[in-house]
Image (tube, rainbow, N blue to C red):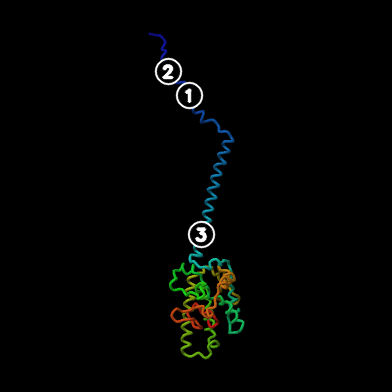
Amino acid sequence: MGGPKHGGGDDSDDATDRLLNAREKNSRWERPVPWYQQKRAVVGYAAVLIVQLVVAVGLAVLLGRTRAELRGQILYSPANEAIDWSVQEFNSGNGLHGDYIGPPRPALEKAWAELLGPMNLRLSRETIVKYHREGEAVALSDGTGYAGSLNVYHELHCVRWLHKYVWNDMYWPDADAETKRKNRSHSDHCLNTLRMFAMCHGDVGPVIYSWQPGILKPGANGTAHQCVDWSRLSHWASERAIDIYEPGLIVNPELGTYRNLSISMILQGRTSN
């Protein structure tokens, strides 16, 4: 009855073995990782983060540039290649003097003639096709392209016309009632055209008021604007300018060769504007 129980001792040994085996397995995970492996892992993680950061920054820059380009040039123009923007400051005092204002005089006439010189341009077929105007565009008889202009020259034409209208007694000293009516109608057209262009451009440069010496009402001066490099754009236009009065260059398919007659508002490029 009181003999030893060998079965109980075996159970204890088995439990001890299982515990040791579990500790051995756990110790494999608890062994410290060699320093060089840790360093390699850290460097790897850092490299991944750097690559992700570079990609993110690159995408942000590309997206920002693309959106800026879309805002600036969503309309195709062959002259887009000549556009170079910069910030320029206008001084209201400059408007009181200049080559383009004041009474008619030889220097003023010359300045306006040069400014409007490249008003009429030779446009490529590619441009005509992009605007789907193949069926109505005025082809040049020499086969070198099509007659056209840039909107900015229409704006300048209107400024020139309004300058003449201000000095109408000197430009049209003997105007009859019909001439006066036409001039007034043309002036209304130009005023409305410039209004539309101003609203279209939407210059959002802030105008900051300041006090002027001896003047009760605050005024604005030194306003900043985003401007094209005019000399660059004018040079681009000059390289493509045509003389619409060149005999035989423009031929109306129904009425014949264009002479010194107006074919459209936009193609009036001489000082008669």
Where is residue 148 shown, x and y percent of the image?
A: 50, 74
94 vs 8, left or right, is right
Q: Which element is circle 1 on?
A: helix
Above/below status of 114 relative to 173: above
Residue 218 shows in the view: no
Q: CA distance from mark 2 to mark 1?
A: 15 Å
Looking at the picture, tell me which residue is in the foreground, 120 or 1.
120
Pointer 2 residue: 11
Residue 215, by quadrant, is bottom right
In the image, residue 155 sits, relative to residue 84, either above or below, namely: below
Disc 2 marks a residue whose amino acid type is Asp
Whether residue 13 is visible here, answered yes or no, is yes
The label nearer to you, 3 versus 2, is 3
Residue 136 position, x and y percent, is: 44, 74
- Residue 21, numbered circle: 1
**Going from the N terminus, do you reach mark 3 or mark 1 first?**
1
* Image quarter in which the N terminus is found: top left
Dot 2 falls on a residue whose secondary structure is: helix
Q: CA distance from mark 3 to mark 1?
A: 64 Å
Residue 221 on image: x %, y %: 58, 72
